Amino acid sequence: MKNRKKLIAVAITFLLIVAGYLVRWEQNQKFNNLRGFYSQKIKWESCYQNFFCGSFRVPINYDNPGTGYFTLQAIKHVASDSSNRLGALLVNPGGPGGSAYDYAMSADAIVSNALYKTFDIVGFDGRGIGESEPIRCLTDKEEDAFINIDGTNSSQSTLIAAAKTFADSCKKVAGLKIGHVSTFETAKDMDILRALLHEKKLNYLGKSYGTYLGAIYISLFPATVGKFVLDGAVDPNISIRDQSLNQTAGFEKSLDDFLSANPTFKKADIQNLIERAGIKPLKDKKGRALNRSLLITAIAASLYDNGLGWANLKLGLTNALFKSDPSHLLKLADDYNNRDNTGHYYNNQNDIGIAINCLDWRSRNSFDELTADLPNFIKASQTFGKYIAYSQLPCAYWSAPPIQPKLPFKDIKSPPFLIIGVTKDPATPYIWAQNLASEFPNSVLLTLNGEGHTGHNRGVACIDTKVDGLFLRGELPEPGISCVSGGN
């Protein structure tokens, strides 16, 4: 009897193994070609409050779909006025590496009430980002060390060693996938999601880096482009070097504008604080030092927003300069770096952002080439130039080649869509929006004359009403319209 029970148990175990193998074989066969990825179904389940969560698969390598897949996490808020529903609206906050999943969770705050009621607001974390098989190259302590490196006061060997260690760590933790987290591939993932949402046309609101993602999608899938808004535009034809140089100059100009609006502080005060941070930095009550790297990060992060950002910078500088208290500036740097007060990095944007950049742009300059270019960065900005100049050094040691669209971004015949540019945007200079508009002749450029990064949802009715007009009624504004920050 005992032997019989053992035989039965062995038989059952064998059948379970076979069944599991058959399920995996069937799944692998299903995802052996693009048709399988487009025909899968998302199982939406209630999550959080009034949201639905689900996942879908995309091929690691679109040139060879059968080699494996990423599992991407998506979230949506269903239109509250179902009888007047207009479809799904995919949103992306930028980055690269920003979590669109988290962004969509703030659906009621990132779009108007009219859009909130009539669209399903959808976000998904791209390959390697946030909830979607996140690639974390460094531990929290390693991340601290990497971020705290002072590019102006470190030896060549220190900078190169840090860049190599980062690149090697990314390869070790991610393997094959580290070469397939490009924006080009994420744009293709967006089209799979469009199909799984049962949308014939994709509606999209992309900001900052999200505009680059949107521009690639428009170029690849013009037949499925619905209503698109690209806000805080990236020029897809610019090099990563020129991106960095333009941003360096943009942040210096925004700092000058901040100082003009806050005459209590002088440029010399900030320069002296930066010098002090490299010699004898201020420390908070826990003994944590405000080094140069963190100070520069705090200043730059505050310049993204001339409202709350400038107010926070004013408070931080006041405390540091007049009270020798760096705690507020440290918090500004931590918030930008996604670091909590325990020293934990609560998402992987720092790591995956570099990984994406290394795949998106062709140029990978060596340390010597970056050093030769350093005077141009210093000329563009005495404050930020030295720190931004070496920011792309890890890409020189990247284990995978760039993955870029095999199409020219020039005179692209696309469906009409809206581009928003801000004249004093430090992160995505206005000229980029102008260039993007010239590369897509059917686009319309809407200008915000003012400070800060991106134009939509910043309290400027002139901008927000035109965004709503496009999504709700399909209306594009007349070309050449300019709005004023703080105006209607």
Image: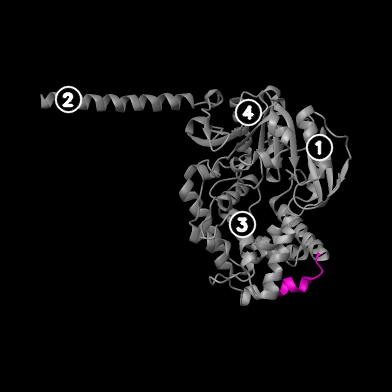
Judge the density around disc 1: few (<14), some (14-19), many (≥20) Cα neighbours within 10 Å. Answer: some
**Residue beneath label 1, please?**
465
Judge the density around disc 4: few (<14), some (14-19), many (≥20) Cα neighbours within 10 Å. Answer: many
Q: Is residue 170 above or below residue 183?
A: below
Nearer the observer, 133 or 282: 282
Nearer the observer, 366 or 225: 225
Give SS at disc 3.
helix
Q: CA distance from mark 2 to mark 1?
A: 73 Å
**Residue beneath label 4, please?**
194
Give the colour scheme shown. Answer: one colour
Residue 114 sits in quarter: top right
Judge the density around disc 2: few (<14), some (14-19), many (≥20) Cα neighbours within 10 Å. Answer: few
Q: Which residues are magenta?
A: 262-272
Give SS at disc 2.
helix
Q: CA distance from mark 4 to mark 1?
A: 26 Å
**Residue beneath label 3, please?**
335
Residue 68 percent across, percent down from the top left:
48, 34
Q: Mark 4, mark 1: which one is toward the viewer?
A: 1
